[in-house]
Amino acid sequence: QVQLVESGGGLVQAGGSLRLSCAASGSINSIGAMGWYRQAPGKQREFVAGFTSRGGTNYADSVKGRFTISRDNAKKTVYLQMNSLKPEDTAVYYCNAENLRGTYNYWGQGTQVTVSS
């Protein structure tokens, strides 16, 4: 089992920045890919940014150039630095981890990000 705990959400004005953290615990060695998703009210959950199982990074087009995913292996933590935030970035942000086989996904509890105009 893998446990994921997010933190760092909050209320920020448009143009501001936030950094989200996702701390992983449990069967860390069973994790392949990790990343961030978000879900806005009335919308489906969507991919934001992530590390592939080989260590590469991917970003949604809507956040490229504004968001940066990084990790601290020693702290077993993945970060999402969000700059130049827009009201449309408002959502609950979820940390995701996929097992090595790609057959199971773990989710954190989510952290709210609200960007005011």
Image (cartoon, grey):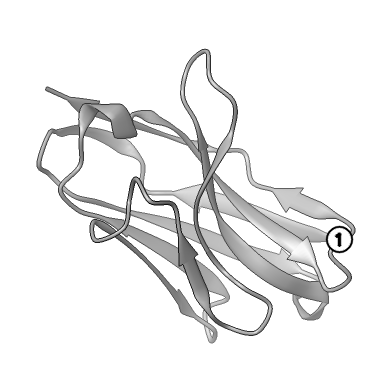
Q: Nearer the viewer, residue 3 or 66?
A: 66
Q: Nearer the viewer, residue 17 or 68?
A: 68
Secondary element type, mark 1: loop
Left or right, residue 17 beside residue 29: left
Q: Quadrant of residue 81?
A: bottom left
What's the residue at 72%, 56% (across, down)?
3
Q: Position of residue 98 (x, y in %)?
A: 75, 62
Q: Where is residue 107 in the image (x, y as percent from the top left)?
A: 69, 47
| Residue density around tag 1, few if under 14, some if 14–19, many if 20 or more, within 10 Å | few
Q: Position of residue 114 (x, y in %)?
A: 29, 28
Q: Quadrant of the N terminus?
A: bottom right
Indicate whether 92 appears above or below 72: above
Tally of numbered tags: 1
Callout 1 amino acid: Gln
What's the residue at 52%, 70% (across, down)?
77
What's the residue at 58%, 76% (across, down)?
76
Q: Which of 1 and 31 is in front in this view?
A: 31
The residue tagged 1 is 1
Left or right, residue 110 beside residue 11: right
Left or right, residue 76 beside residue 28: left
Q: Quadrant of the C terminus?
A: top left
Q: Nearer the viewer, residue 74 or 98?
A: 98
Indicate whether 18 appears above or below 102: above
Q: Position of residue 38 (x, y in %)?
A: 50, 38
